[in-house]
Amino acid sequence: MDTTSVAPTTTREKRGLALYRELGEGIEKVARDFYLVPSQDGERFYHVDYAGETCDCADHEYRGVACVHVYAAGVWISKHRAKASRCDGCGRIPPQGLVEVGPEHVAHGHEAQEGQRYCRPCAGRAGVV
């Protein structure tokens, strides 16, 4: 499901979606459930704990509700989760998971590139397993 086509219901949700669309490439995962999210003007970064739905921005600290940075992180997570579950070879979502290409595969002259993720059949064709 394309999360950018779902109509947000609150102003913070709409601004979070706009933040993702404008500056989403600047969102960075720094640890499990923790993200650096740019401010709406792109001049600062805020620390978002997505699992706890907290942020160190003034809006969240003052109101205690999910802010635009939490919503932007949520869209980023959804987009990356969808990309991460698809095979780089065939584009399908395999039921058994994916095999990630490591440096040991690249060093041995396989056609796969480090960081790519393949379903088992595509990994075999690429010489990864």
Image (cartoon, grey):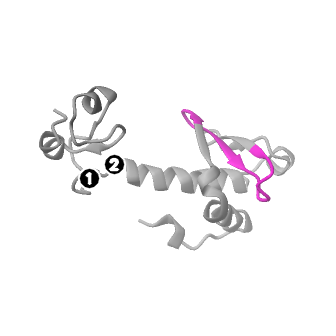
Residue indicated by mark 1:
93
Which of the two labelled residues, at mark 2 and mark 1, occupies the earlier sequence position? 2
- Residue in front for this viewpoint, 83 or 50: 83
Q: Residue at x 21, y 41 (%)?
A: 96
Residue 95 position in % (x across, y down): 21, 46
Q: Magenta region: which residues?
A: 30-45
Residue 12 is left or right of residue 112, and the answer is right
**From this viewpoint, which residue is outermost toward the top?**
104
Q: How many marks?
A: 2
Q: Quadrant of the N terminus?
A: bottom left
> Mark 2 touching mark 1, by CB under 8 A?
yes
Residue 2 is left or right of residue 125, and the answer is right
Residue 74 position in % (x across, y down): 57, 52
Q: Residue at x 51, y 73 (%)?
A: 5
Residue 30, quarter of picture: top right
Residue 120 position in % (x across, y down): 16, 41
Q: Residue at x 76, y 55 (%)?
A: 42
Marks 2 and 1, how far apart at CA? 6 Å
- Mark 2 residue type: Ser
- Residue in front for this viewpoint, 38 or 101: 101
Magenta span includes 36: yes
Residue indicated by mark 2:
85
Magenta span includes 16: no
